Image: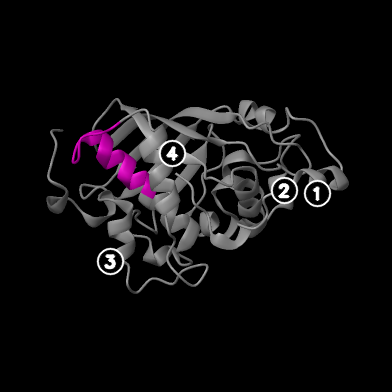
Amino acid sequence: MSATPSKNLPLWVQDRDTVIAQSTDATWRHGTPPDYTESKAGLAQESKCKHLEGSLEAIAQNLVRTFEMEASFKTSPDQWLSIVNDKFRMSSNGGQAYTAKEVSASGTYNLFIGDTEDYQASQETFESSGKLFRTAFPKGFLWEVLEVYSAPPKVTFKWRHWGTFSGYYKDYAPTGETVEIVGMSVAHLTEDLKILSVEHYFDNSLFLAKLTSGGKQTTNEQQATGCPFGSWFKGLKLR
């Protein structure tokens, strides 16, 4: 697929801010649309790839970022432009395939990670999981497409998800290091580039190992070092 001018593409594969601006009837989880100003600044500085506007890489990247934004902030899957709501399914590492309603209720973190030694999805809510990772990554947890290997209707792509671990993860001390996940996804799309299903593959054990590598600290130690809790309720600023 050659590069296509964005104005000739469906809204949901254009820039995420364009989608937000035109979602005038959406019901937002926090009452107002998300602000990705800080994330855009981080992406401009830290992204490894600069995809040509309208290229297959840019289309795949915009579509996934739109889906993440809608799943995180639009309360009703009926208002998600990026998917075919009644057919949509999402799975991770060959596990259970979840519907849009289930994604909206539980949040992507809980469904991506599940129950592990260092993270218990069954004990977290949409809100608590978001707060947990916003605290660990107060400057945002960014996302980009690295490579695309096949064109629609079955798009296979490699991606990178990263952020600076500068806040506490539960009672584990921050290390100040960049924590990075590299994974693969396979997305099945309609002719107009909406997501029918998407399968993600990545090693979340490496991710959680990084978040626990700083060792545990007591509440008094956390207070002494200053934990950046002030931005908890500003909304997810990821990818």
- 64 horizontally vs 51: left or right: right
Tell me the residue that label 4 is attached to.
143
- Residue 46 colored magenta? no
Position of residue 33 relative to residue 175, above or below, is below
- Residue 60 colored magenta? yes
The local secondary structure at tag 4 comes to strand
Tell me the residue that label 3 is attached to.
22
Magenta part of the chain: 50-65
The local secondary structure at tag 2 comes to loop
Give how far apart the Cα atoms at labels 4 and 2 are: 24 Å
Q: Give, as a three-letter code, the residue at label 4.
A: Trp
**Dot in front, 4 or 2:** 2
* In contact (CB < 8 Å): disc 1 and disc 2: yes
The local crowd at label 1, few if under 14, some if 14 to 19, many if 20 or more residues have their Cα within 10 Å, is few
Residue 223: which disc? 1
Q: Choose between 136 and 113: the one closer to the eye.
A: 136
Q: Give, as a three-letter code, the residue at label 3.
A: Gln
Tell me the residue that label 2 is attached to.
227
- 231 horizontally vs 101: left or right: right
Query: At which x and y percent is residue 84?
Result: 34, 55
Q: Give, as a three-letter code, the residue at label 2.
A: Cys
The local crowd at label 2, few if under 14, some if 14 to 19, many if 20 or more residues have their Cα within 10 Å, is some
- 70 horizontally vs 227: left or right: left
Q: Give, as a three-letter code, the residue at label 1.
A: Gln
Q: Main secondary structure of the magenta part?
A: helix
Give how far apart the Cα atoms at labels 1 and 3 are: 42 Å
Query: At which x and y percent is residue 96?
Result: 56, 42
Give how far apart the Cα atoms at labels 1 and 2 are: 6 Å
Q: Earlier in the sequence, mark 3 or mark 2?
A: 3
Residue 198 lies in what quarter of the image? top left
Query: Residue, x 40% and y 66% (percent of image)?
Result: 78
